[in-house]
Amino acid sequence: MSRELLYLADAVAHEKDVDREVIFLALEASLVSASKKKYGQDWHIAVDVDRKTGDYVTRRLWEVVADEVADYDADQQIRLSDARKTRPDVEVGGYLEEVLPPVEFGRIAAQTAKQVIVQKVRDAERDRIVSDFAIRKGDIISGLVKRMEKGNAIVDMGRAEAILPKEEMMPREAIRPGDRVRAHLQDVRRVQRGPQLFLSRISPELLIKLFAQEVPEIGNGMIEIMGAARDPGLRAKLAVRSNDPRVDPVGACVGLRGNRVQTVINELKGERIDIVIWAADPASYVINALSPAEVSSIVVDENTHGMDVVVGPEHLSQAIGRGGQNVRLATQLTGWTINILTEEEAQAKREEEESTFLNHFIQDLGVDEDLAALLVSEGFTSIEEVAYVPVAEMMEIEGLDENLVGELRRRARDVLLNKAIAQEEQVALSEPAEDLLSLKGMDKGLAHLLASKGVVTSEDLAELAASELCEMVGVDEERAKALILEARAPWFA
């Protein structure tokens, strides 16, 4: 029998290309199952197979518990006083063992062993596939479409199957069994059933990888891809920069007579691709990203991370694109919120903003309209700027002298001080409840900040959504979720 176990382990390990140890673990598990059928399903049984001889030992185990434990499982546990009658040195938490006669490997035991071994081998194969493909995550892989399931394509990768979900296919792309597809390996996951490899044909990473394959200058580092945005099957934008002043990044990506970009376009079923120059200056980058539309002027708002881009009437439709496609892709590519305006719209917006700034200066600083208009015309947009812009810069403004500058700065700082005092008083008036302060993950500063926003008790916090909490006090999403779950714990108790 021992020799048969060794032959079985070697044969299955060689046939399935899995580690011999996996087979031995499966054999041990099957022998445990067979032993339990003979002796008792509730028994704690362990089987050890010798890896060299094939001999195996079957043992029954009892966990040693303290004598004070009243409710214990007699099939798997034993009191300390009883255990020491057999083994005087045993301690609580240890195990008492008894060697059992090994079961005969009969028909039923063999069938059980076969089922366990098959499952273990299958699990080992799946783990190996996951490990092999995990290092290829993010690459382009190709395979043959094996079948379609509920609109999803099951792709044969040779040793494994991958799934190309319907929502990750390009619009109007007809994929049928027998077709060969190239896709971005988006994820590799361990799952109980079905494909473990997840593909995408619509991700921007596919566009990046395709250009990396077609353009040698990208592979050797002379050209760097800085970003990509796609409207799959219709249009895409790719931002590139050159690390060598002698190399034109756009020309290299386009290729001679457009052969390089055309290869990528063909793979993406005719998707139009705009290749633009990346720029460190955000305004220049946005202007490049909006090409081929021409930009008249641009206003950057760092606070909202947005830009107002002004274009002439003849370039308006081109800048926006069909259905807003061009501006949407430029926004995705640059990460800036882009507002396309005509000259008339930009002028109206400027006048509205200037009127708002003018009224603030008149009300908060107590100045007349002429002086407020002078500050606005010189680019002042807030009380903070009036309070902290260097005196020398303000003195350069025609119409302002040293006394007037000093008075404006004093009034501006008084306004800011009064606002700060009022805010502190508001916080002081709103004391957080004890249950909010004692919440796991909560600190005193955050609790007082929440109280100032009207969230005084843990019940108030429990009723918030994570996004609301993030916006209210500026915590990250993970912490927000953890705090809300803690606050909701009494709901499920």
Image (spheres, helix red, strand yellow):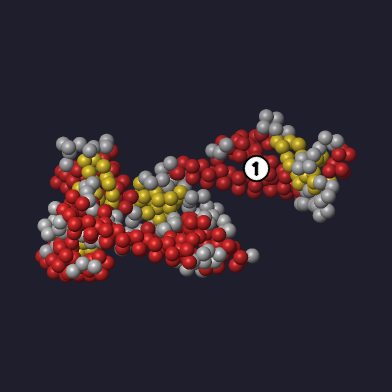
Badge 1, how many Cα within 10 Å: few under 14, some, many 20+?
many
Camera-nearest residue between 28 and 448: 448
Instruction: Answer with left or right where residue 132 lies relative to residue 230.
Output: right
Camera-nearest residue between 327 and 142: 327
Quadrant where the N terminus lies?
A: top right
Instruction: Name which residue lies at 69% across and 45% down.
Output: 30
Give how far across and how far down residue 155 sits, in percent: 42, 52
- Asked where in the image residue 362 lies, by quadrant, the reply is bottom left
Toward the front, the furthest residue is 403
Q: Amino acid at mark 1?
A: Ala
Instruction: Name which residue lies at 20% across and 36% down.
Output: 244
In this rendering, is residue 144 above or below 419?
above
Q: How many marks?
A: 1
Give how far across and how far down residue 230 sits, in percent: 28, 56
In this rendering, is residue 245 above or below 153?
above
Instruction: Answer with left or right where residue 335 lies relative to residue 253.
Output: right
Q: Is residue 360 visible?
A: no
Camera-nearest residue between 459 and 290: 459
Give how far across and how far down residue 432 sits, in percent: 53, 64
In this rendering, is residue 40 above or below 418?
above
Q: Is residue 401 visible?
A: yes
Toward the right, the furthest residue is 85
> Which residue is label 1 attached to?
26
Instruction: Name which residue lies at 23% across and 59% down.
Output: 407
Give how far across and how far down residue 18 sits, in percent: 56, 38
